[in-house]
Image (cartoon, grey):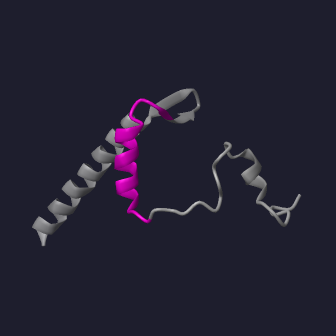
């Protein structure tokens, strides 16, 4: 089965009505997109994996914790120099 039939990509037929593959994208840093999604869709599910699900808000909080940990590690390395 070809990925492109001359008019659309195979996955486009699974897009919700009104969503276009050719829609313009806003160029923003990934952290900005994640922060905005965590605020806008805080109670909506973002991931369901092996019976465990997370909301955008929960995922945003996890990302923030990881970022804080990375900053702390980097600060420690800077102090050692």
* Magenta span contains residue 1: no
Residue at 16% x, 61% y: name it: 75
Closer to the camera, 79 or 30?
30
Closer to the camera, 77 or 1?
1
Outermost residue toward the front? Answer: 18
Q: Position of residue 28 (x, y in %)?
A: 40, 63
Name the image quarter holding the C terminus.
Answer: bottom left
Residue at 21% x, 62% y: name it: 74
Name the image quarter holding the N terminus.
Answer: bottom right
Outermost residue toward the left? Answer: 79
Q: Quadrant of residue 79?
A: bottom left
Outermost residue toward the top? Answer: 51
* Magenta span contains residue 40: yes
Q: Which residues are magenta?
A: 27-45
Q: Is residue 72 above or below residue 49?
A: below
Q: Position of residue 13 (x, y in %)?
A: 76, 49
Outermost residue toward the bottom? Answer: 81
Q: Is residue 12 above or below residue 16?
A: below
Residue at 67% x, 42% y: name it: 16
Q: Is residue 49 above or below residue 1?
A: above
Q: Is residue 40 above or below residue 76?
A: above
Residue at 74% x, 52% y: name it: 11
Q: Position of residue 23 (x, y in %)?
A: 59, 60
* Residue 77 located left or right of residue 43: left
Count all numbered tags in the image, as a single digit.
Answer: 0
* Residue 75 located left or right of residue 56: left
């Amino acid at each position: 089965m070809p990925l492109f039939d001359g008019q659309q990509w195979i996955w486009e037929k699974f897009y919700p009505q009104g969503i276009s593959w050719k829609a313009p994208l806003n160029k923003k840093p990934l952290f900005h997109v994640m922060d905005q999604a965590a605020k806008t869709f805080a109670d909506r599910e973002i991931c369901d994996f092996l019976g465990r699900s997370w909301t955008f808000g929960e995922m945003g909080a996890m990302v923030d914790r990881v970022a804080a940990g990375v900053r702390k590690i980097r600060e420690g390395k800077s102090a050692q120099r």
